[in-house]
Image (cartoon, rainbow, N blue to C red):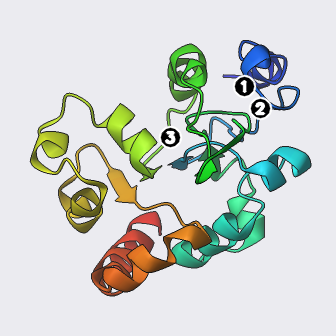
Amino acid sequence: MDTIPLYKEIQACDVCRSFLPFAPRPVIQFDTSATLLIIGQAPGIKVQESGIPWNDASGQRLREWLQMDSNTFYDPKKVAIMPMGFCYPGKGKSGDLPPRKECALQWHDRILASLPNIQTTLLIGQYSQNYYLKDTEFLSKYPRLTERVKHTQQAPDSLICLPHPSPRNQIWLKQNPWFQEETLPYLRQRIR
């Protein structure tokens, strides 16, 4: 399956234009041979400016968590990146605004249909977890992000729940030392 037409269609999307602080610039990465899928929130301002997914401090921490070099991470034949919102949503009172909902509704199913080789999906942050775990017993059992991350080995369908790797989450990481000790080794083992 050729993903280039779908990629070009997404790059031309302007469904949210009137709600965004800048012209739409969808930031995604995918190829039919990718085996790892990363579903995060939405690009930050630095990513919006560069057009490169996870090209900021959050991305650096994520690559450290994965123990993955930039060449591997940015190889669409290995890693697909599909955020909940494809464009920078703008600044809120405490951080960026939530991802726009239109992207997931319009594009996610089509992108997922073009990714037959995905073996593991990382759900980073509450927005992707709430969306992809809705109607699951796992979400009912673990309604809070911390609980989902702590029990991610019980998540369905090769899904791994992670907190957002933002530097703003430093307090969460300090309050939850089990993440470094238990979750990161599990994550690294799964993606290998």
Residue 83 percent location from the top left of the image: 59, 40
Dot 3: element: loop
Q: Nearer the viewer, residue 167 or 83?
A: 167
Mark 2 and mark 3: Cα distance apart in space? 23 Å
Label whose residue precedes the other's in the sequence (3 or 1): 1
Expressed as whole percent of the image width and height from the top left, the position of residue 107 reads 60, 20
Residue 166 picture quarter: bottom right
Horizontal relation, residue 4 to residue 140: left or right:
right
**Residue corresponding to mark 1:** 3
- The residue to which callout 2 is attached is 26
Of tags 2 and 3, the one toward the viewer is 2
Residue 66 badge = none
Residue appearing at x 52%, y 75% in the figure: 65
Which residue is identified by label 3?
117
Seen from the viewer's position, the closer of residues 85 and 52 is: 85
Tell me which label, 2 or 1, sits earlier in the chain: 1
Count residues near mark 1 (Cα–Cα under 10 Å), then give few for <14, some for 14-19, many for 20+. few
Locate residue 178: give its quadrant.
bottom left
Task: Please rate how many residues cluster around mark 3, counting C-alpha atoms within 10 Å: few if below 14, some from 14 to 19, many from 20.
Answer: some
Report the Cα–Cα distance between label 2 and label 1.
Answer: 15 Å
Which residue is at 60% across, 72% downward?
167
Of the two numbered discs 2 and 1 in the rendering, the one whose residue sits closer to the viewer: 2
- Type of amino acid at the residue the image marks with label 3: Asn
Which amino acid is tagged 1? Answer: Thr
Q: x, y percentage for residue 108?
A: 54, 24
Residue at mark 3 to residue at mark 1: CA–CA distance: 14 Å
In front here: 16 or 3? 16
